[in-house]
Image (cartoon, helix red, strand yellow):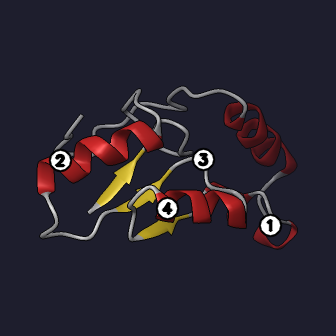
Amino acid sequence: MIAQGCEAGGHVRGTTPAIELLAAVRDAVGEAYPVLLAGGIATAADVAARLRLGAEAAVCGTIFLMSDESGAHPRTKNASRRRARRCSPSCSARAGRRRIA
């Protein structure tokens, strides 16, 4: 199961920060399922912090979009950097996935 906090880029519907969401998801699914955490992960220290808090893995996405190698347009990269400074959904989407919190 992937728990995606509001810090994540792309189609984010939630408003709960990833670290807070991890505890809620862990309580909901128990130990039967691995929980991966997405949102606001940009450095090795971010990954280590998520693992210490109980995530089995960290899911990174936007950080790769902003790399030189991605080929994304500079405006897209700048917009992602601006969104990364605040915790709010970047856009709304109907993904049809069940929300836990």
**Observer able to see residue 97:** no
Tell me if mark 2 has few (under 14), some (14-19) or many (20+) residues whose alpha carbon lies within 10 angstroms of its own: few
Quarter of the image for residue 53 reads bottom left
Disc 3 versus disc 1: nearer the observer: 3
Sequence order check: which comes first, mark 4 or mark 2? 2
Q: Residue under circle 4?
A: 52
Query: Mark 2 and mark 1 in contact (Cβ < 8 Å)?
Result: no
Q: Position of residue 72 (x, y in %)?
A: 77, 59
Sequence order check: which comes first, mark 1 or mark 2? 2
Q: Is residue 86 left or right of residue 2?
A: right
Q: Residue under circle 3?
A: 40
Disc 4 versus disc 1: nearer the observer: 4
Q: Is residue 21 left or right of residue 5?
A: left
Tell me if mark 1 has few (under 14), some (14-19) or many (20+) residues whose alpha carbon lies within 10 angstroms of its own: few
Cα gap from disc 4 to disc 2, whole angstroms: 16 Å
Sequence order check: which comes first, mark 4 or mark 1? 4
Disc 4 versus disc 2: nearer the observer: 4
Task: Specify the amino acid type for callout 2.
Answer: Asp
* Residue at image point 70% right, 67% down: 44
Q: Quadrant of the C terminus?
A: top left
Task: Specify the amino acid type for callout 4.
Answer: Arg
